[in-house]
Image (cartoon, helix red, strand yellow):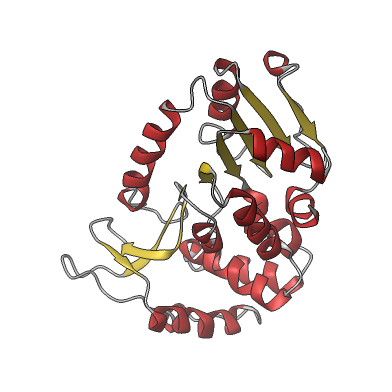
C-alpha cells in the first residue's frame, strides 16, 4: 500500500481503529546498543523491572535515531479530524499524544503503590530522579536506593511505575479508557471501518491481534491493514478484506 492508497483509505473511512504494538517501545532498535542491554540486566537483577518502560524511553532519547517520534507524529496527523481509537500494547508515553487512546499495559505517566492500592501522576521530580538513575544504569552500576517515586500515603509501601512490568499492576490506571473503547467499538458495526494494525506481535495477542481480526471479520464494511516485518500474514477469513505488509511498522509509517 503506497501513500496515495493509504490516504484514500483514511479519507473513505468513517471510523479508524489503530493498534500499536511492541515495535513502538523501540526495543528492537535499542538491543543493538551495549549500554541498553547492561541497563536491562541490572534492572532485572535488582528487581526493578517496573522501570523498563522508562529505561526504554531514556535510551531512545539518547539514541535520537529511532524514528518512533516521527512515526507517531505522522499517525496523529492522519487521524486528525477522524473518528478513531488507538489501542496500544506499547508503553511509550508519546502514544498518549496521538489521539483518543487506551494503553492497557500502562506507561510512565502514572505511578502506583507497589502493593497496588494507590494511583498518582508522575511528577517532574520523579522524572529527574529516574534520569539520574539511568545515567548510572547505562554504565551497568545503578544503585536501587538512587531512585524513589515516593511512599504510598495509605500503606507506606514504595511507589513504582504503573505498568505491566509491576508485580501488583493496578489496572485501574486504564480501565476507564477501556470502557470508552468498548463502547466506541460497538458503534463501528456497519460503518466503513479502517483497521490499522502496526507492529503488533504475539506478546499480548488477546489485546489487539485477535480482537482486531474478529472486528474486521464481522464488519462487512471493514478493511484490515496489518504492517509487521515478520507476522504480516492475514487469516483466510480476511481474504479479500485487507492487506499484509512485510515491513518494519515504525519505518513504514515514518516514510508515508
- Residue 33 horizontal/vertical position (percent): 76, 70
With 217 as the anchor, is 128 left or right in this view?
Answer: left
- Residue 238 horizontal/vertical position (percent): 69, 18
* Residue 241, above or below 52: above
With 180 as the anchor, is 193 left or right in this view?
Answer: right
Q: Is residue 42 visible?
A: no
Residue at 59% across, 23% down: 216
- Residue 64 horizontal/vertical position (percent): 72, 75
Circle count: 0
Residue at 74% across, 64% down: 67
* Residue 38, above or below 209: below
- Residue 106 horizontal/vertical position (percent): 44, 54
Quick one: 190 or 253, which is closer to the camera?
Answer: 190
In terms of image quadrants, where is residue 69? bottom right
Quick one: 101 or 146, which is closer to the camera?
Answer: 101
Classify the position of the N terminus by image quarter.
top right
Residue at 55% across, 56% down: 98
Amino acid at each position: 500500500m503506497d501513500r496515495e492508497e493509504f490516504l484514500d483509505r483514511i479519507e473513505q473511512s468513517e471510523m479508524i481503529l489503530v493498534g500499536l504494538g511492541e515495535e513502538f517501545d523501540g526495543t528492537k532498535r535499542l538491543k543493538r546498543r551495549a549500554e541498553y542491554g547492561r541497563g536491562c540486566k541490572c534492572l532485572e537483577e535488582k528487581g526493578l523491572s517496573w522501570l523498563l518502560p522508562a529505561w526504554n524511553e531514556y535510551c531512545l532519547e539518547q539514541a535520537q535515531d529511532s524514528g518512533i517520534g516521527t512515526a507517531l507524529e505522522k499517525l496523529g496527523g492522519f487521524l486528525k479530524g477522524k473518528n478513531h481509537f488507538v489501542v496500544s500494547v506499547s508503553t511509550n508515553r508519546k502514544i498518549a499524544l496521538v489521539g483518543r487512546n487506551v494503553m492497557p499495559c500502562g506507561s510512565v505517566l502514572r505511578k502506583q503503590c507497589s502493593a497496588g492500592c494507590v494511583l498518582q501522576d508522575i511528577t517532574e521530580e520523579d522524572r529527574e530522579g529516574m534520569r539520574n538513575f539511568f545515567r548510572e544504569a547505562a554504565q551497568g552500576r545503578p544503585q536501587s536506593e538512587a531512585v524513589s517515586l515516593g511512599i504510598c500515603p495509605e500503606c507506606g509501601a514504595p511507589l513504582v511505575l504503573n505498568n505491566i512490568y509491576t508485580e501488583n499492576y493496578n489496572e485501574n490506571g486504564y480501565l476507564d479508557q477501556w470502557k470508552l473503547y468498548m463502547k466506541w467499538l460497538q458503534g463501528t458495526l456497519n460503518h466503513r471501518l479502517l483497521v490499522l494494525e502496526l507492529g503488533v506481535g504475539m506478546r499480548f495477542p488477546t489485546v489487539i491481534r485477535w480482537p482486531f481480526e474478529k472486528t474486521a471479520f464481522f464488519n462487512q464494511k471493514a478493511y484490515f491493514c496489518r504492517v509487521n516485518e515478520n507476522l504480516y500474514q492475514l487469516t483466510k477469513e480476511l481474504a479479500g478484506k485487507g492487506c499484509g505488509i512485510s515491513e518494519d511498522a515504525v519505518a513504514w509509517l515514518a516514510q508515508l
